[in-house]
Image: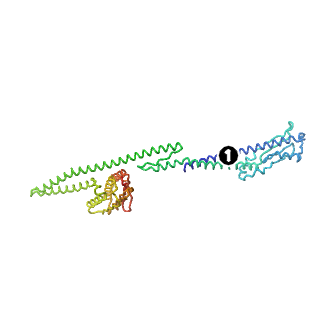
Amino acid sequence: MSLPAHLALRLLIVTLLCLAGAVAWTLWEARTGLREEAAVSAGRIAAQLARQPGLGSVGPAALPISEPQAEPTVLMILPGICAEIRLGAETPRRLCGDWDGLGTAPAWFRDALAPEAGGAPVIREIIYRGRRLGSVAAWPDPVAAAGRTWRQVRFASGLALSLAGTTAILGWLSATRLVAPAGRIVQGLDGFDAGRAAAPLPRFKATEFERIATAFHALAERLVRTEAERTELMRRLVQVQEEERQSLARELHDAFGQCLAAAGALAAAIEAGAPEDRADLRADAVGIETVIGSMRESLRGALAQLELPDLTAAGLGEELRGLISDWRARLRTGPSLHLDVTGDLTGLSPQASASLYRIAQELLTNALRHGRPSRVFLRLQGTGTGEEPVTLTVDDDGGGDAPSAADAAGRGLAGIRTRLAALGGQLSLTGNGSGIRACATVPVRG
């Protein structure tokens, strides 16, 4: 639930509690008012009867009261109030004020209010010259009291509900406008992209949101600086790794190559100079030459993996064709390798070309060593626009599970991700139905 909805709900709950309090207050006020009106009515009737001519001579015997004398007494009773007059031994007489204008309450409300509606009657004595002549008892009529109370409760409830609804709506509108900057801040946080500055937030009137925006801008600047430093570190790491490979390749070629050449020459000399009766010596020399030849092949393969060809001379596409030819020659029998190069690759930076060549080496090695494919397809696709990234895809049908391969703790994929991170590229591993598809994207000017 949104913050404005939370606020509106809480305001509604508060106003409903206020409504309950208003209803309780209205009930108490109505009951108090009815008792006060009963007391006023009883006092008026007692005062009127005490002033009637001849009433002071009333003794213990009953003094009849004619209709003309009683009529003014009815006028003293307030609407909705009933009174009972007792004079000496006279039969008590009950009178009620007119209450038609008070309305009628629902039956359930009358039933709920019945124990409280009437209440105890208010009694006033009729005193004439210090002598008690009788008494007047007054009380609210239950039906009239319920109707009057219902009218007051209905008015108070309607007013309170109107205030509750208006308060909730205005609170929701105010909160929506107040927390609108939070949505802008969330959009800014969602828009964070590695290596790219986040869109600046506008200035906010609320101090709290302005402080959040200031912290957001500071965080965005730190993130951009950190990402730039990380990218530069990755590029430097890839560069140092490439330099170490080239240095190792030169050392292997110069040191081991010469040693193997010298050992091969010595073995040939031994074979040629061995006496006729030393067939065993010639056989050992031939064996040494065979081992040296095998070592030369291994050294040639290691140098091919370590040395980076001159991509500026032949181009990335031609060097990839040479890589496929070397693998075909090395495998002789085995899976068929296919290469498809499309699009314009002339805009590729040297760093991107070198990384794509190394990534192709690693992906081919992984496909051939860790699976049993019958076919491996390598596709290099450029757009020629200079804006869209270049895509390198390696498909094989050697089985395997893409999620497990992506989570494998091997050095090959880690090296590929390091190169792509330095260039701002990405690597994805997905299944193709019969094997794994590895797709690397590299910006043209990475």
Most foreground residue, 215 or 128? 215
Which residue is denoted by mark 1 in the rendering?
Answer: 22
Give how far across and how far down residue 95 sits, in percent.
82, 48
Q: Is residue 242 visible?
A: yes
Give how far across and how far down residue 291 sits, in percent.
19, 56
Q: Which residue is drawn at the image coordinates 88% and 47% (left, top)?
A: 68
27 vs 333, left or right, is right
Quick one: SS at disc 1?
Answer: helix
Most foreground residue, 74 or 192? 192
Q: Which residue is drawn at the image coordinates 37% and 47% (left, top)?
A: 230
207 vs 236, left or right, is right
Most foreground residue, 102 or 379? 379
Most foreground residue, 103 or 385? 385
Give the image quarter of residue 69. top right
Q: Residue furthest top?
A: 130
Q: Is residue 281 visible?
A: no
91 vs 103, left or right, is right
Report the number of numbered marks: 1
Give how far across and how far down residue 172 sits, in percent.
58, 49
Give how far across and how far down residue 366 sits, in percent.
32, 57
Q: Amino acid at mark 1?
A: Ala
Few, some or many residues within 10 Å of mark 1 (<14, 14–19, 20+): some
